[in-house]
Amino acid sequence: MSARHALRTTLSALRSTGSVLTLVGVLALSGCATGVTVAGAPTGLPSEAAPTPTPLLETPTPSSSPTPEQVTPVEGPTVDVKGATGAGRIQLETYTWRTQGQGSKALPPEHGSYLVLDLAWTATEGTLTVNPLYVKLRGGDGTEYQPTMGVDGNEPVLATRKLNTGETATGIVAFDVPRENVTVVFTDETGIQAAQVAITA
C-alpha cells in the first residue's frame, strides 16, 4: 500500500467517526428539548389546595311571645251627665286591671298596671260632646292621671265626636296607674266635673 492510499483510508475513517459523534450529540440535545423525563423532576400535576370549610351559622332561636293575660271584666255603673249643649248618660260597661299592654306595639305600663274602661256615651237631650280627654282618673293620694290615648294597645279607643239625641258612642279609655282604689271623673266641655265613679283595686 502506498503512503497516499494509507492517508486516504485514515481520513475516510475519521470522517465517518465524526459523523457518528455529531449524530449522537444532536440526538442528545434533541432529547433535552423535547421534554425527556429527567430523574428527580416532578412527573405529576401539582395537587390542589384543600377547600376551606364553610363555618356553620347558628340560627337564632325566636323569642317566645308573652302569654296573653287572663282578666275578668267587671261591670260598672251608669251615671247621668250634663254638658254645655245637652245631657246624656255614660255607662261604664266593664273595667279591667291589666299588667301588660295588648299587641306587639303596646308599651308596658310605667306605674305597674293599666286600668281599662269600656265606655258607652248616649245623648238624651240636645247634643253631647264625647272626648276621651273628658275622662280623668284620681288616685287615692289625689294624683290625677290622663288617658294613655292608645299606647296600651287596647282598642277601639274612644273617638271625639258630637252626639245628637238618641245617638251612642262606644270605646276604650285606659290609664297607666298603680293598682289601688281610684275615682273616675267625667267632665264637660268646660272642664267642670259632671260625674264620678269609684273603682276598687
Image (tube, rainbow, N blue to C red):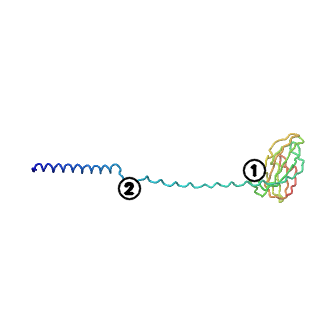
* Whole-percent x, y for residue 150 in the image: 77, 49
The type of residue carrying mark 1 is Gly
Q: Are marks 2 and 1 in contact (CB under 8 Å)?
A: no
Counting residues from the N terminus, which is met first, the one under dot 2 or under dot 1?
A: 2
Closer to viewer: mark 2 or mark 1: 2
Q: Horizontally, is 52 left or right of 5 in the view?
A: right
Q: Is residue 42 left or right of residue 89?
A: left
Relative placement, left or right, of 142 versus 107 is right
- Mark 2: which secondary structure? loop
Q: Amino acid at mark 2?
A: Ala
Q: Judging from the image, what secondary structure is the residue with disc 1 in?
A: loop
Give the class, few, some or many, for how many residues have Cα within 10 Å of label 2's Cα (few <14, many ≥20): few
Quadrant location of the C terminus?
bottom right
Residue in view at x 46 percent, y 54 percent: 47
Horizontal and vertical percent for residue 103? Answer: 75, 50
Give 36 or 99, whichever is nearer the viewer: 36
Real-space CA distance between mark 2 and mark 1, rounded to the nearest whole angstrom: 76 Å
86 versus 146 height, above or below: above
Residue 92, numbered label: none
Q: Residue 154 in the image: x percent, y percent?
A: 78, 49
| Pick the front one: 179 or 190 | 179
**Viewer-closest of 110 and 125:** 110
Query: Which residue ends up furthest to the bottom in the rendered image?
Result: 141
**What residue is shown with label 1?**
103
Number of labels in the image equals 2
Give the x, y percent position of residue 177.
80, 56
Residue 121 placement, left or right of 29: right
Instruction: Read off the residue under disc 2.
Output: 41
